[in-house]
Amino acid sequence: MRLVQFKETSGAQHVAVVEDAETLLVLTGVSSTRKLAEIAIKEGTTMIAAAKSRMGEDRISYDEVAKSGRLLPPITHADPAHFLVTGTGLTHLGSASARANMHTSGNKAADETDSMKMFRMGVEGGKPAAGETGVQPEWFYKGDGSIVASPGADMPSPSFALDGSEEPEIAAVYVIDGDGNPVRIGFAIGNEFSDHVTERQNYLYLAHSKLRACSMGPELLLGDLPSHVEGTSRLYRDGKVIWEKPFLSGEDNMSHTLANLEYHHFKYDLFCRPGDVHAHFFGTATLSFADGVTTQDGDEFEIESSLFGRALRNRLKTQAARKVVVKTI
């Protein structure tokens, strides 16, 4: 089962089950996936069961909602500061070479980079035996809920950015329950949009390069993630595809288990604050920047996987420069 969040022309928010490629079945008595999750937690049931029990008779056109710009991210919070967006890197079996080449200096072999060392650590210790703790992955903070662009909306890039490129990834979505326990409610396809030129300048600039917008959805996949996921990432310019490449994800194609990545995120108490929501990106091995593509304003990113239904699309839009003024009182 897959869910979407959308808003009416009046602005009221709703949740719907994706009945088919053209039809949304609106849920009754619940206005967000977060509220549905809270109900499921309280009732001790699953997201699927909670959604099934709230299926109404109201069916609407999926295309009409999408074309009118009324799709929302698959998870939101009324207070964006309580929606934390984070991610991991070097988690996929094909991710090492492009990253290592990005950070290789003229007198340093690619297999000696910190990136390659971290990748090897993941391959050797990212899938621990039951009851054991695996090696921690690369981890980064992207921002709060205010940075999540809706499906179909512009992907904002700051005026000072040196690059703005896609990263097709799977993001897991969590709600923290009243006891401070993370509860995974589903998965979404996502674009963990980043500034790769800034990152390439110096690996210590990774944190800066990740403080960018992102997008996910429009659909939230309920239940478990298959161990093998296939998808395609495309870049359009003036309506034509200028770059296209398949990508793989799921544990069969990763150097870490999802459980290991989740442990090393939620082991920190500050990420277990009751009522918060989290979107955690699991990394990628595919990006146009690694193939020498330079994006331009107006380019459209498209990331799709049949597992996640409708493709995720966003158009690159550079923001106007903003003067930074720090006041003293």
Image (tube, grey):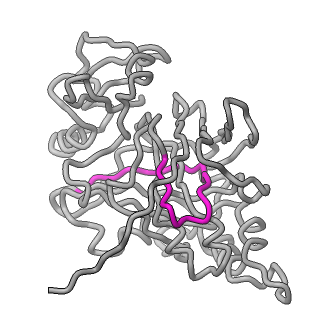
For the residue pair 219 and 108, the one nearer the viewer reads as 108
Toward the viewer: 92 or 301? 301
Q: Position of residue 230 (x, y in %)?
A: 66, 40
Foreground pick, 299 / 269 = 299
Question: Which quadrant of the figure contains the N terminus?
Answer: top left
Report whether residue 301 is seen: no
| Residue 97, placed above or below residue 49 | below
User: In the image, what residue occupies the spot 24% across and 36% down?
Assistant: 32
Task: Report which quarter residue 7 is drawn in.
Answer: top left
Q: What is the x, y in percent for residue 106?
A: 84, 85
Res. 128 image quadrant: bottom right
Q: Magenta includes 4?
A: no
Judging depth in this view, the residue of 95 and 313 nearest the camera is 313
Give percent across and percent down for residue 205. Answer: 56, 78
| Camera sees residue 42 | yes
- Magenta-colored span: 155-176
> 56 above or below 17?
above
Q: Identify the residue at image location x=23%, y=31%.
A: 13
Q: How many marks?
A: 0
